[in-house]
Image (cartoon, rainbow, N blue to C red):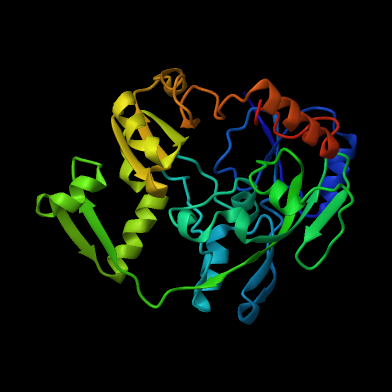
Amino acid sequence: MSTTSLMPSSESDIRDLLISETEGLHIAGGQSRLRATEEKVISTCALTGIVEYEPGALTMVAKAGTPLSIINETLQKENQQLAFEPPEYKHILNLLGHSTIGGVFATNASGSRRIQVGAARDHLLGVRFIDGLGRVVKNGGRVMKNVTGYDLVKLMAGSWGTLGIITEVSFKVLPIAETQVTLQIASREASMQQLLKEFSDFEIDIFDAEESKKFWSDVNNLAFFENMQGDLWRISVRPTDGIQIIKKLDPKASYLDWSGGLVWLRVEEGFNVREKMQKMSGHAMCLSGSFNQFHPISTIEKTMSTSIRKKFDPKMLFNQQVLN
């Protein structure tokens, strides 16, 4: 499928595009996470720049297309960070794009520290976006203009571009810890009971600050799966079910994150993970492969989702493949 990429540089440009548009649109930040299924792509890459940064207040406001790398570099100069450690998948997915701060919050992209500090949505303070009718909507942060009755900050986080095109976000940041140490315990058994009873049977590594930083960066960015063939799947389950998923599916490679609640799998091409999970609870996203990227949703979920989407995007222009 051939695509036409549009990179509007202002909100007025986006509004002009949407007012006259009748066909489906693929909304993207740096085009590093969501597969394009529509012929016309609108990217926010040209909406860049840090609008306001107050290190003392631990807050930042940035335009949606600002590269995540720029955000991180700016924060590091003040010894601060995005505590939820948003991951970067472009290398493992062989994509040319880059992560943007708007895309991070639109996809609720959260790293390994999510179970400790919360997800991306928990750090989002305000959002500004343009809905399907070309209207500018803003909520939270420095401004408050919301007549929909919804908590738009929470609603937009993880909406994957289905409700509007995010143009600006405000969010909180946190200080970087002075130092960190990681304890890695390797074993063929997953049982913590065995860990306690037979501690001597485990191989233990203690990483210093730099090694620890690199280790968690590799975990977040899926470096362990590089140079491996096969489809890549991300599965959200109850923490107690993570190891059972791996045992049942027997993938080529796997690892657990979020204390077992997030399962990463590299499987043979064409292996239908969702079919094998039919009798197991969980949500499986296909990041690379021939299957639909998003897990199918129930009729009730689809009805609720469509109802909300039509309030913001009556023409159903945005990212039609998401949540369908």
Task: Decide if residue 290 is in sight here.
Answer: yes
Q: How many marks?
A: 0
Eyeballing the image, is 13 above or below 116? above
Q: Nearer the viewer, residue 315 or 59?
A: 59
Residue 64 falls left or right of residue 292: right
Q: What residue sits 12% from the left and 50% below the top?
A: 198
Is 154 above or below relative to 290?
A: below
Q: Position of residue 49 (x, y in %)?
A: 68, 65
The correct choice, above or below, for 172 with respect to 121 in the image is below
In front: 17, or 235?
Answer: 235
Residue sitting at the far left? 200
Residue 168 placement: quadrant: bottom right
- Residue 318 in percent (x, y) is at 74, 35
Q: In percent of the image, x 55 and y 24: which residue is there?
A: 292
Q: Residue at x 22, y 47 (%)?
A: 193
Q: Position of residue 39 (x, y in %)?
A: 69, 28
Residue 56, position as x, y percentages in the image: 62, 82
Furthest residue in direction bottom, as rendered: 56
Looking at the image, residue 12 lies above or below residue 271: below
